Amino acid sequence: MSFKLVLIRHGQSTWNLENRFSGWTDVPLTELGIEEARQAGRLMMAEKLTFGVVHTSVLVRSIKTAEIALEEMGLSWLPVTRHWRLNERHYGALQGLNKKETSERHGPEQVQIWRRSYSVAPDPLDPDDPRHPRNDPRYAALPPELLPATECLKDVVKRMLPYWYDRIVPDVVEGRQPLIVAHGNSLRALVKHLDGLSDEEVVDLNLPTGVPLVYELDDMMARVESRFLGDAEAVAAAAAAVARQAG
């Protein structure tokens, strides 16, 4: 028996366009990001994909991408679960900074370590910093010790996997084919797990915005195959653009 799972990184946001570290900051989609979400819906329709449930983060760019794609498919009625464990990586003191300017200030090698190292996190935020999630009402019910002041990708894997096992896997095995709309790093964490990537291999993984990634899984939730929808050359170019972001 095999199962399908579809992952989508949200459409381009304003801070993607401005080359800023977005993290847990809410930023809107650009016009291109809105069109990417629509195109994701069209691609999934052309593939005759259907879903029983949708999972998103609690960040608006993820929520809006899912809403737009589902509307394009005529599936706006689907139940949606939103959870902070699918949020983007928290970039700590880097959050909101321009990647190129930060690279010029601290040196490209240091910023590349902060941005792409599996286990090195940027400097943390002070608890009183407005950017700290404990100052955001959407996380008010969570124990303070769960809220990150900074994260590396290893931290994202650690906080994302419980949601995978507890919430998404049951949907998969019970036949509620799920669509997951999240972020570059929360999805990199999931792809690392699904593809069995090493800590070194995941550093070079780049996920383009707004492109559905379809997984076929066996009954042990192991990857059988995966593929992006759409033109292969365009997908490769979009992934290369992510890799080229300064810093």
Image (cartoon, rainbow, N blue to C red):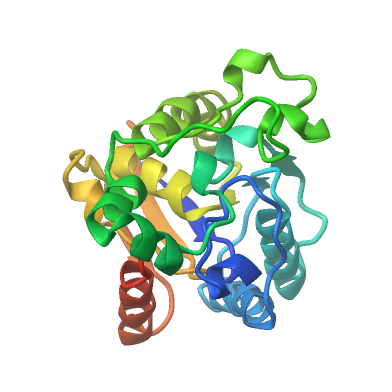
- Above or below: residue 53 compared with residue 234: above
Q: Position of residue 215 (x, y in %)?
A: 39, 54
Q: How many marks?
A: 0
Judging depth in this view, the residue of 200 and 231 nearest the camera is: 200
Image-based side of 234 in relation to 143, left or right: left
Q: Position of residue 124 (x, y in %)?
A: 50, 32
- Above or below: residue 23 compared with residue 44: above
Residue 89 visible in the snapshot: no
**Residue beneath the point at 54% across and 46% down:** 88
Residue 217 visible in the snapshot: yes
Quarter of image, res 70: bottom right
Judging depth in this view, the residue of 83 and 241 nearest the camera is: 241
**Residue beneath the point at 34% across and 54% down:** 106
**Residue beneath the point at 62% across and 45% down:** 24
Judging depth in this view, the residue of 157 and 75 nearest the camera is: 157
Image-based side of 162 in relation to 155, left or right: right
Q: Position of residue 19 (x, y in %)?
A: 50, 69
Image-based side of 221 in relation to 181, left or right: left
**Residue beneath the point at 66% across and 50% down:** 25
Q: Position of residue 77 (x, y in %)?
A: 82, 56
- Above or below: residue 218 compared with residue 45: above
Quadrant (top left, top right, bottom left, bottom right) of the C terminus: bottom left
Quadrant (top left, top right, bottom left, bottom right) of the N terminus: top left
**In the image, farthest residue toward the front:** 105
